[in-house]
Image: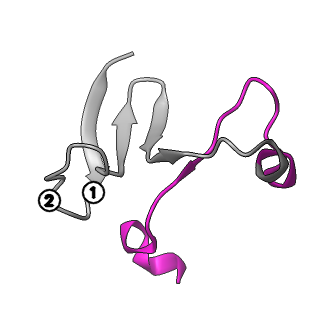
Amino acid sequence: MEIKRTLRGPVNDCANGKTCPKIVETSAGLAVVGVPVTDPALLALLGASPEESAVVVPPALLPELR
């Protein structure tokens, strides 16, 4: 997989090097970078399969969805 371009983000200056959410276009599709959801109950509510993961991104990353 290769990265083509950053579509959105980061929405902050990433000064801490830990919170740099973004959406990136790759040769395989879109990749979303954010804080991982690790709570099994929340993953179940989201309908994530064992092969999937979920991340949290700030609303500012997708303002048109507000």
| Residue sitting nearer the eye, 63 or 41 | 41
Q: At x 66% / y 41%, what residue is drawn?
A: 38
Real-space Cα separation, disc 1 to disc 2, in angstroms:
10 Å
Q: At x 26% / y 31%, what residue is drawn?
A: 4
Q: Confirm or deny contact between disc 1 and disc 2 (CB under 8 A).
A: no
**Label 2 Cα crowd, 10 Å radius (few <14 / some 14-19 / many 20+):** few
Q: What is the count of numbered marks?
A: 2
Image quadrant assignment for residue 2? top left
Picture layout, residue 52 above or below residue 10: above
Mark linked to residue 61: none
- Residue 23 picture location, percent across and down: 38, 48
Identify the magenta region: 43-66
Q: Is residue 66 left or right of residue 24?
A: right
Kind of element beneath mark 1: loop
What's the image's color scheme?
one colour
Residue 55 among magenta residues: yes
Check disc 1 and report the residue beneath it: 9
Amino acid type of the residue that numbered disc 2 sits on in the rendered structure: Asp
Q: Is residue 38 left or right of residue 55?
A: right
Picture layout, residue 5 above or below residue 28: below
| Residue sitting nearer the eye, 55 or 6 | 55
Kind of element beneath mark 2: loop
Q: At x 39% / y 15%, what residue is drawn?
A: 1
Check disc 2 and report the residue beneath it: 13
Picture layout, residue 64 above or below residue 46: below
- Residue 41 picture location, percent across and down: 84, 49
- Residue 37 picture location, percent across and down: 62, 46
Outermost bottom residue:
66
Amino acid type of the residue that numbered disc 1 sits on in the rendered structure: Gly
**Label 1 Cα crowd, 10 Å radius (few <14 / some 14-19 / many 20+):** some
Q: At x 35% / y 52%, what residue is drawn?
A: 21
In this rendering, which labeled residue sits more in front, label 1 or label 2?
Answer: 2
